[in-house]
Structures are given as C-alpha cells and as structure tokens.
Amino acid sequence: MESAKILLVDDEQEFTDILSERLTDRGYNVESAKDGFEAINKVGGSNYDAIFLDLAMPGIDGIETLKKIIAKNPDLQIYLLTGKATLQKGIEAVKLGAIDVLEKPVDITELVNRIKDAQTQKMVLMQTELEHKIGDILHSKGW
C-alpha cells in the first residue's frame, strides 16, 4: 500500500507537531490544520486517507467541523481525538459519520493501525465506485 495522506486537526500546535513528526518518521504524508475552518478548506482541495480531528477546539468545534467535512465528502475516514471524551459526544460523532473517537494521548501503534484500516476502507470504497461506473457504462451501451 502506498503512503497514506493524513490530516491532523488540533488547536494544540505542540501536539500536532509531535504527532506529525512521529507519523512522518513512519513514512506517512502528514498535513495539519490549526482549527476547523482550516481543515474544511484543506478537505476541499485534497483527498486524505484519514483525518484525525480534535473534538474540543475554539471557534468551530470537532462536531461542527465533522458535519461540514462529511457534507463535502461523506467517504472520508474521520476519527475524533479528545482528552475530554464523553459517551454522548462519541455517540453523536459516530452517528454523524466519524469512524471512532480516540482518547488523548493517543498510542502511536493504535493510530498507525487506524490509518491502515482507513486506507483499506478507502480502497474498498474506490473499488465499489469503480464497479458502479463500469456497470453504468455497460448498461448505457446495452452490452
């Protein structure tokens, strides 16, 4: 599998710098966003294998950012990160389209496993989409 493209979204610059460095050292292509607004803009121009989104951020929080990102691309693999996890927020995030909620500090091995899962899911989605397109072409041509 090729190197995954990751977006880290967190207002804690030190956290994203350290996590970005650790993931880059493992061969991942990592970008970061300091808030939800920046993340939404980045998602509009890029295709990420996985997005790790902080739940508690000033301005636009993780839940609102999740809603806006999912509205742009419902197939993105988004995980919420939080140091203040509540069951209610976790359930809400998953209902809105997040894959899971991970607690900070996140274990790097767990994070890498989630990235691999996200890559696999993205490949499945792409394969399904391709099969639908081929089916549409064959159906429209009457073959």
Image (tube, helix red, strand yellow):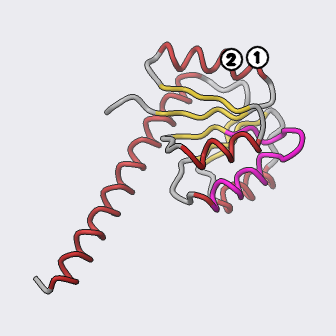
Residue that badge 1 annotates: 14
Specify whether 130 is left or right of 115.
Answer: left
Q: Amino acid at mark 1?
A: Glu
Q: Nearer the viewer, residue 86 or 77?
A: 77
* Residue 109 in picture, x, y percent from top left: 52, 23
- Disc 2 and disc 1 in contact, CB within 8 angstroms: yes
* Residue 117 in picture, x, y percent from top left: 45, 41
Q: CA distance from mark 2 to mark 1?
A: 5 Å
Q: Quadrant of residue 21?
A: top right
Q: Residue at x 43, y 35 (%)?
A: 116
Q: Amino acid at mark 2?
A: Asp
Q: Is residue 61 magenta?
A: yes
* Depicted 8 relative to depicted 59: above or below: above
Q: Which mark is residue 17?
A: 2
* Residue 65 in picture, x, y percent from top left: 74, 50
Q: Residue at x 64, y 62 (%)?
A: 71
